[in-house]
């Protein structure tokens, strides 16, 4: 099946520093990747849609200068949390959509998530 | 806009009990419907999906049928196990390639 990896799985950083989270589709190509944020006991909140080779589309209320997204290739998207603050502490999850048609298309596969703690 | 409403938990069951988690949706057009499961400390895993009306998705003993007339996609399992304890999310995809819209999640706790 389609596998999406995220790295790191956990990260602790100090306030004011930047943290980069990688999302990779391991065995398929993904023209579109999505970044979600999940608060404790809450559903997933879509942050942005990342398209390979173009600028990400951010949801309303998400600061694009704070959450930098780069989709460098068909298998890699990165989310950089810049000048992190304690309120940025959360569980960040990416997903990738299977490219093309067929049974797997229009299905999103999720990474295992990254737990960010900002001290 | 499109939305998903699912029953709020927690749902607490004994092993081998029957499970139903209700999910209804609002969408224009013909969305694809999904159930995802999230085990403690992990990301989301696709449990099952259905892409058109009357389709039944099934996996690991779980089933859900896409009912257009009632705009529902209820999740069922005939006999739950302790290992099924997790958070279950109902979701829809309004258009191919767009982000999923999630329900708030239902926590299931199964005791032996």
Image (cartoon, coloured by chain):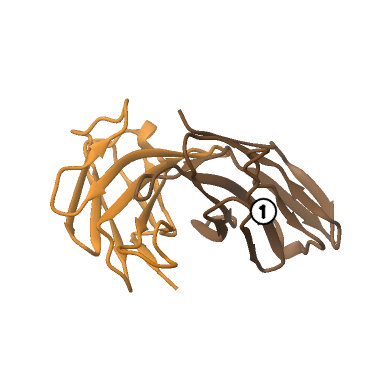
Chain colours: A orange, B brown
At x 58%, y 47%, the residue is: B89
Judge whether B19 appears above or below A119 on screen.
Answer: below
Judge whether A34 appears above or below A4 on screen.
Answer: above
Query: Percent x, y for residue A82?
Result: 21, 39
The answer to whether residue B33 is left or right of residue B9 is: left
At x 79%, y 61%, the residue is: B80
Q: Quadrant of the C terminus of chain B?
A: bottom right
Query: Percent x, y for residue B53?
Result: 59, 50
Query: Percent x, y for residue A81?
Result: 26, 42
Element type at mark 1: strand
Query: Percent x, y for residue B92?
Result: 50, 44
The answer to whether residue A117 is left or right of residue A40 is: left
| Residue at which label 1 appears | B65
Q: Is residue A46 visible?
A: yes
The answer to whether residue A42 is left or right of residue A48 is: right
Q: Is residue A119 visible?
A: no
The answer to whether residue B51 is left or right of residue B61 is: left
Instruction: Name the subunit of mark 1.
Output: B
At x 71%, y 39%, the residue is: B9
| Residue sitting nearer the eye, B69 or A104 | B69
């Amino acid at each position: 099946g389609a596998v999406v990896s995220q790295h790191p799985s956990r990260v602790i950083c100090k306030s004011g520093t930047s943290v980069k989270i990688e999302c990779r589709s391991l065995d398929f190509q993904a023209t579109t990747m999505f970044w979600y944020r999940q608060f404790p006991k809450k559903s997933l909140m879509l942050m942005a849609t990342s398209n390979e080779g173009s600028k990400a589309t951010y949801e309303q209320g998400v600061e694009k200068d704070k959450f930098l997204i780069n989709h460098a290739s068909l298998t890699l998207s990165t989310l950089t949390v810049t000048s992190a603050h304690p309120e940025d502490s959360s569980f960040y999850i990416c997903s990738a959509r299977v490219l093309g048609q067929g049974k797997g298309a229009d299905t999103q596969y999720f990474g295992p998530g990254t737990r960010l703690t900002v001290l | 806009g499109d939305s998903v409403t699912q029953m709020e938990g927690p749902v607490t069951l004994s092993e081998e009990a029957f499970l139903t988690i209700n999910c209804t949706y609002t969408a224009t057009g013909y969305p694809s419907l999904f159930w995802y499961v999230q085990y403690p400390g992990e990301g989301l895993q696709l449990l099952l999906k259905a892409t058109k009306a009357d389709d039944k998705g099934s996996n690991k003993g779980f089933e859900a049928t896409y009912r257009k007339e009632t705009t529902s996609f209820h999740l069922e399992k005939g006999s739950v196990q302790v290992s099924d304890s997790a958070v279950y999310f109902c979701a829809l995809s309004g258009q191919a390639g767009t982000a999923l819209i999630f329900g708030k999640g239902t926590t299931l706790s199964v005791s032996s």
